[in-house]
Image (cartoon, grey):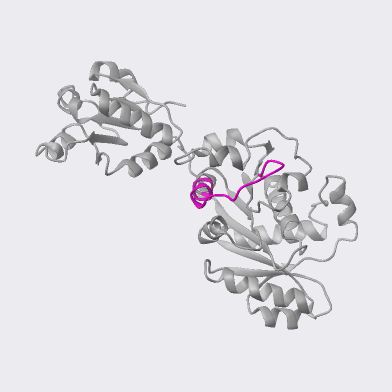
Amino acid sequence: MHRPLAITEDPALLDDLVRIAAAAGAQLNVAPTPAHARPFWNLAPLIAIGADQAEPVAATSPPPRDQVLLVTRDTEDPDTWRKCVAVGAQSLVTLPTDERHLVDRFADAMDPDPRSGAVICLIGGRGGAGASVLAACLALRASTDHLRTLLVDADPLGGGIDALLGHEEATGARWADLVAREGRINSSALQAALPAFGDLAVLSFHRGDVDAIPPQAMRSVLEAGSRGFDLVVVDLPRHLDPSATEALSRARSTLLVATADVRGILSAVQVLSELREHTADIRAILRPGILDDDTAMTALGIPSAGTLPDQPRLTATLNRGELPRLGPRTVLGALCTSLLRDLLPPS
């Protein structure tokens, strides 16, 4: 992949550009003069021209192209916009005011084929309802259908969704590795860092002591996931923390897994009241119980997304580090296929 190009002889400005690019997970090619820049002009995904080199670049009459920025730290220069037009820049970036915007521009330049992946959150109406299992199965089913899928474990006390998949020993980054990194995450770098199994990438927790996920880290992961994947499945904790509410605010749909018994529905109604503060499209997955489906769904007051029948051998299967079979003729596989059809836009 080609690198963004910086054209400047100003050492202070260059330091800023290198630092900002690093925050976006990018490295720069650096050209101090237009002559050095010429081989990279048509290849670089983005060009940042320092104001000090605007006149020399304009004098070479470079061929027009998009993704050209003029970068300055001088807010008082009356010729700034003239220089911008002369070099063919589409926008002006003033540092330090526009630093966050420039991080985003560098990150976008390193993601040449954004996918606009949908974020789907799952949460249990009570402990043991099966939300984590359904999240893992939904992600697996999607990846089997060749959708590039990211499965995000957002529950620090859930035991690790990688263990649920039987891949807790897989090498790759966990939450602690990403939390330590500041700035926007490049989607290609995220895909390369995470444990992956075919078209499924998994972000979980290390074993042992875990810390809560900062909301800004969740935001960066979901932004990168939406750019680099077709689907992002987030397994939420029942007690919503700031990172969980960050995920909910970005969810296209949220699935609440509820058991059809008195305590299960009462608990799910309480969870639902919190969910409604952070997201709009909430649908229920009902587990069978002593209440009939109509009574349970009336109590919840949200649309039904499907029914998840009991799996008699599920516990034994999970304890072997396996997941239930997800073929189209299995009950669980058919449910996942139906959810993907209903929740994702047609391609």
Q: Position of residue 308 (x, y in %)?
A: 78, 65
The location of residue 78, given as percent across then percent down, is: 9, 39
Q: Quadrant of residue 190?
A: top right
Q: Residue at x 59, y 74 (%)?
A: 273
> Residue at 69% of width from left, 72% of height from top?
268
Q: Please check the rendered image and state whether residue 215 is part of the magenta-colored stretch, yes or no.
A: yes
Residue 161 x, y percent position in the rendering: 72, 48
Image-based side of 321 in relation to 228, left or right: right
Q: Position of residue 85 (x, y in %)?
A: 17, 37
Front position in the image: 239 or 336: 239
Residue span colored magenta: 204-222
Q: Residue furthest left?
A: 78
Towards the viewer: 162 or 206: 206
Foreground residue among 111 and 53: 53
In the displayed image of the protein, which residue is found farthest to the top? 35
Residue at image location 84% in from the left, 78% down from the top: 290
Name which quarter of the figure residue 65 lies in.
top left
